[in-house]
Image: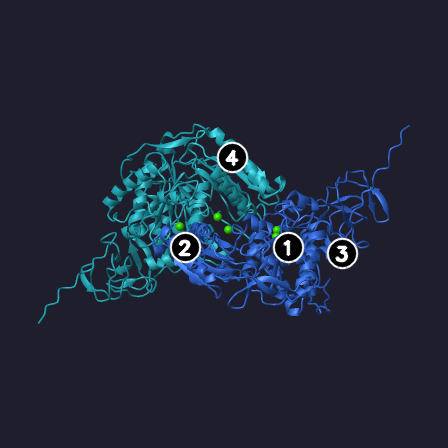
Chain colours: A cyan, B blue
C-alpha cells in the first residue's frame, strides 16, 4: 500500500481579510484541489484560472459580493465556498451604488510616505512653464494634411539637429473636416489640438493646413511656443509645403541654441494616470502602487490627472467621498449622468466596458474593474473636475472626463498639459504618447519578463500595503528620472504619434 | 477731350441657357462693371468673386433659383439682375425637393461615347479576381498595434523586395477598442477591415493584434489573399512581433515569384468616385468630365461606385429617376431618411456640409453642391445601393452610403472593392488611398498649374458638353493606364495610408 502525499492547499489572496467574499488564486486551481476559505479548507468546485476569483464563503443569490471591502457585483445565484466567481454567477443588473448626497469634505490628508525627490532636470520655457522634453511638432489641422505632416517630420529628423532637441514629431489624426461646426465634437477637437500646439514639451510647432477644411488653423493656435502655420493649397502642393516647413523648422532650431536642462521643483510636474489591458492584478499590485507614487507627487505640490470616466463607473462614490468641496463631488455625479445618456443615445451601455482581455484576466464586472482603476489615483483629496482636454490648473488630484480607450484618454491628458504619463497594464501594452514620455508598469512579474523590452517597471511583487509603499517610492523616483530625460521603453522604441486619437464625438458628414 | 474706351463686358457662363437664373463669372467682377444678363447688359450690383454666381434675371423673394436647370436654392429676398447670388440672398430653408414616388424605371441608356479601351494590364489572383496593384499589407486590429504595424512596414520595405511587389503598407487606424460590441459601429469597423484584409490589390496581409482588444483578429479575416495573424501580447512585445512579421512577409514574398501583369478586360475594374474641396467649377468641369469617364467604364461592363450621401442631399430625386428598379430608388430615399435622423441625433444637420472652402469657392447651398456632386456619376442607370464598406457586386453604377468626408468615404469604397479611385478637386487635395491608386482631377487649369506636382488631370478646359466628352475619353484612358501600373501623382509621392479612416459611429467608451 502506497501513501499519497497530501495535496497542496491553494491559498487565495484575500485583499481585505474578514470582509471580502472572494479571493484571487495565484495559479490555476483544478476542480477538487483543496482551497483555503473562511473557517477551513474545501475542495475547489470548479477549475479557477490563475488570477481569477474563488468564493471564500457562501454567498446567497442577490447578495452584494465584496472585494477590497467594496461591492464588485451581485450574486446571480447561490455561490458555495470554493466556487469560481465570474460571469456565470456575478453581475451588476441595473443597480447603482453609493450615496447621492454630497460628502462632508475629506478630513486632513496624510500621504503614505514622504516624497524622496524635490527636483527634476527639465527645460524652462520663456513663458515660465516647465517641460520634460524638447520636441518640434508638425500638427495637421485635418487628416487631409496628415501625410504631408509626416513627410515633413521625416525629412526634418534626417536634416535638422540641435542640442537638446528630442526630435520632430508629426501629430497626425483623422479629424478636421466632415464635421459640423459649433458642436460639442468641434469644440473638443479644437481644444485638443490647441492643447498640443501649446504643449510645454514643444519648443516649436508648425501647423499644416490643407486650406479648405472646416478646422481652420486659427482654431488650433493657443498661446504657447513659437507656432507657424502653412497651407498646402496656398503654397501650391506637397513639395512646396515640405520645403517651406523645413525652412521654418531650421529657423526655429537655430533659435534653440543653448537649451539645457536645469533643476526644477517636482511641483511643476503634471502626471497623467492611465491603465489599459487590465487583469485581476491591476487593482492588486500596479494600480495601488501607482496610487502611492501619485500621492507622493501630490504631497510634493505637483498635479495628478485621473480620468477614464467609464472605468470609474460603479466606484464614483469613492471619488465623491474624497471631493475637496461638495461642488466637486457633484461634478463627478454629473459626469456619470452625462455618460449614461451618451452611451444610451449611442446604443451602448457603460457596463459593456470590460473587454475580452479584462474578462479573460478575471475581471467580471465594471464595478470590479472600476474599483481597481480608482486605486491608481491614490488617496489624496479630489480638488477639481475638468472636461476632456481642458488645461489642468489645480494642484493635487484632478479628474478629467475621458473615455477609457487608452489612446483617446491619454490624448486628452496630454492636451490638458500632462508632462508625464504612467500606464499600468496587466495584459501588456506598447503605448506611447509623444510629446509626453510614458512609463509602462506591469501588474505581474510574469508580464514584466514576457514583455521585458516594452515594460519599464514591475509592480508584480507589490501585493501587500508595505510592498506597495516601498515600490510606490521607487516608481515615484523612476517617474522623476523619466522627467529628467531618461527615455521610457516606448519612447526609445519610437512609439507615440499613431496613438494621438482625439475624442471623436458626433456625426461624420 | 479724351475718349474713354468702353468698359469690357463680363459674360457669365450660364450652364443651361434659357432656364438658369444665375451664371458664373470666370474672373472677379467689380461692382459697376457691365455684365451680360438675359436680354441685355446691366452694371454689376456687387463685387462678384471669380467662380461665384451672378443673377442673370430678376428673381423674386421665395422663388426657386435654377442652375443646370435644377433648383439650387430659394431666394431669401428679391434679387435683381447683376447681383451677387450667395449666402446673403440664397438658402434652402427646410424644404425638400423632388417626387417621393418611385420612378417608372429609366428608358434605354445610351453612353455619351464608345469606350476606347477594352483591356488593362493587371494581376490575376489565384481566386480569379483582378488587381491593379500588388501590395503586402500590415493591418492592425486596433490603434494599440498601429505603431508596431508601421514599424513592420518600414523594416519590410527596406529588407524585402520581390518582382512586381509595389511595397508593404501599414493600414493604421484609430479604432478597435473602447467601443461597444455588437453595435452598428462595431459592424462597420469589422466590415471595413475585412474589406481591406481581403482586397484584391493585396498579394498578402499580416494582421497585427495587441491581444486584449475588442476587435479580435477573427473579425478581420475574410476570404482573400494569404492572411496571417500575429499577437503582440502572445509573442512578447514589439521586437518579437516585428521579427515574426518580417519572417512571415519574407515567406510570402518568396511565393510571389513570377507575378506579372497580363491583359484583363476593363469590365473587371471597379472605380470609386470622390470629390473633395469642391468649388464652383466642380460641377461645371471636373465632375461632368468624370461622369463621362464613368459612363464609358459602365458601357464597357465595369463597375462604378458613387457615394458621399450627405453630398447628394437635395439632388436625390435625380438618382431616384435613374434607379433601375423602384426598390433601388426607395433605398436612396431610405438613406436620406437615415441621415436626417443620424445628424439630428448628433446635433448636426445635413445642410451644414458646404465647408468654408466650398463657400469661398462660390458654392452657396447643399443643393447646389449636391447637384454638382451627382454629375460625376454620369448618366447610366443606378443598379444597386449598398451599405458602407459592403462588397460591390453589381455591374454598372452602384451607390454606396458613405459620409462626404473624403478619407472616410474613400475608405468605404476601397473596402468595398474599388481597385481605382478618381478624385475631383477645386480647391486642391493631396489625397491617396492605398492599396488603390487614386487619380486627381483639377476643376480649373489655374489649380492644375498651381499644384502641378499633385494633380494628374486637368479638367479645366471642359466647359462645354463636347469638351467634357472629349476630355472624359482622355480621362477614361488615363484611368486605364493607371490601372495598368502608371503611378498616380499621390502614389508616387507616398500618400495613402494616413488617409485610411474607417467610419466611426457610436460612443467611444
Ligand atoms: Ca484605459
Ligand atoms: Ca492617429
Ligand atoms: Ca465634404
Ligand atoms: Ca468628399
Ligand atoms: Ca489613419
**Is residue A92 toward the left or the right of residue B89 in the image?**
left
The foreground one among A248 and A320 is A248
In this view of the protein, which residue sits in the foreground, B328 or B270? B270
Classify mark 2: helix, strand or loop: helix
Residue holding disc 3: B465
Mark 4 or 2: the one toward you? 2
Q: Is mark 4 within 8 Å of ligand 2?
A: no
Which of the 4 image quadrants contains residue A8?
bottom left
Q: Are marks 1 and 3 in contact (CB under 8 Å)?
A: no
Residue A202 at x, y percent in the picture? 46, 36
The alpha-carbon separation of the residues under discs 1 and 3 comes to 23 Å
Q: Which residue is mark 4?
A: A249
Q: Earlier in the sequence, mark 2 or mark 1?
A: 2
Separation of residues labelled 1 and 4 (CA atoms) = 38 Å
Residue B349 horizontal side relative to residue B257, left or right? right
Q: Residue B315: image x %, image y %?
A: 68, 58
Q: Which mark is residue B311?
A: 1
Q: Mark 4, chain letter? A: A
Give the chain of mark 3.
B
Please say whether residue B202 is visible from this viewpoint. yes
Amino acid at each position: 500500500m502506497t501513501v499519497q502525499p497530501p495535496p497542496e492547499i491553494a491559498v487565495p489572496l484575500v485583499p481585505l481579510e474578514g470582509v471580502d467574499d472572494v479571493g484571487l488564486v495565484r495559479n490555476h486551481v483544478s476542480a477538487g484541489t483543496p482551497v483555503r476559505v473562511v473557517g477551513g479548507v474545501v475542495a475547489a468546485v470548479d477549475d479557477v484560472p490563475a488570477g481569477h476569483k474563488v468564493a471564500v464563503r457562501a454567498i446567497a443569490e442577490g447578495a452584494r459580493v465584496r472585494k477590497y471591502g467594496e461591492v464588485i457585483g451581485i450574486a446571480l445565484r447561490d455561490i458555495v465556498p470554493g466556487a469560481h466567481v465570474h460571469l456565470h454567477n456575478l453581475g451588476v443588473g441595473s443597480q447603482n451604488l453609493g450615496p447621492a448626497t454630497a460628502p462632508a469634505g475629506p478630513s486632513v490628508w496624510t500621504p503614505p510616505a514622504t516624497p524622496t525627490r524635490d527636483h527634476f532636470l527639465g527645460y524652462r520655457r520663456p513663458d515660465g512653464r516647465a517641460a520634460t522634453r524638447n520636441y518640434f511638432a508638425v500638427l495637421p489641422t485635418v487628416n487631409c494634411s496628415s501625410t504631408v505632416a509626416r513627410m515633413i517630420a521625416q525629412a526634418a529628423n534626417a536634416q535638422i539637429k540641435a542640442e537638446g532637441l528630442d526630435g520632430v514629431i508629426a501629430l497626425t489624426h483623422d479629424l478636421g473636416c466632415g464635421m459640423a461646426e459649433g458642436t460639442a465634437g468641434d469644440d473638443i477637437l479644437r481644444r485638443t489640438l490647441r492643447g498640443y500646439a501649446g504643449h510645454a514639451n514643444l519648443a516649436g510647432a508648425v501647423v499644416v493646413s490643407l486650406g479648405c477644411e472646416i478646422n481652420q488653423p486659427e482654431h488650433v493656435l493657443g498661446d504657447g511656443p513659437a507656432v507657424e502655420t502653412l497651407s498646402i493649397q496656398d503654397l501650391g502642393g506637397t513639395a512646396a509645403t515640405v520645403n517651406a516647413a523645413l525652412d521654418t523648422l531650421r529657423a526655429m532650431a537655430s533659435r534653440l541654441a543653448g537649451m539645457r536642462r536645469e533643476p526644477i521643483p517636482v511641483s511643476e510636474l503634471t502626471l497623467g494616470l492611465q491603465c489599459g489591458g487590465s487583469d485581476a492584478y491591476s487593482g492588486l499590485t500596479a494600480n495601488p502602487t501607482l496610487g502611492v507614487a501619485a500621492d507622493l507627487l501630490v504631497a510634493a505640490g505637483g498635479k495628478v490627472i485621473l480620468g477614464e470616466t467609464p472605468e470609474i463607473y460603479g466606484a464614483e462614490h469613492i471619488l465623491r467621498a474624497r471631493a475637496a468641496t461638495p461642488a466637486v463631488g457633484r461634478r463627478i455625479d454629473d459626469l456619470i449622468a452625462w455618460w449614461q445618456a451618451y452611451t444610451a443615445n449611442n446604443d451602448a451601455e457603460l457596463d459593456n466596458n470590460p473587454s475580452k482581455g479584462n474578462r479573460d484576466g478575471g475581471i467580471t464586472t465594471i464595478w470590479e474593474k472600476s474599483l481597481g482603476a480608482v486605486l491608481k489615483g491614490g488617496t489624496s483629496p479630489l480638488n477639481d473636475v475638468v472636461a476632456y482636454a481642458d488645461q489642468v490648473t489645480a494642484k493635487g488630484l484632478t479628474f478629467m472626463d475621458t473615455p477609457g480607450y487608452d489612446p483617446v484618454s491619454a490624448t486628452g491628458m496630454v492636451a490638458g498639459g500632462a508632462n508625464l504619463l504612467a500606464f499600468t497594464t496587466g495584459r501588456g501594452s506598447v503605448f506611447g504618447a509623444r510629446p509626453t514620455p510614458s512609463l509602462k508598469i506591469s501588474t505581474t512579474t510574469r508580464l514584466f519578463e514576457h514583455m521585458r523590452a516594452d515594460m519599464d517597471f514591475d509592480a508584480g511583487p507589490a501585493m501587500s500595503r508595505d510592498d506597495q509603499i516601498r515600490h510606490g517610492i521607487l516608481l515615484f523616483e523612476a517617474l522623476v528620472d523619466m522627467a529628467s530625460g531618461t527615455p521610457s521603453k516606448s519612447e526609445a522604441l519610437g512609439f507615440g504619434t499613431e496613438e494621438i486619437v482625439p475624442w471623436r464625438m458626433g456625426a461624420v458628414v
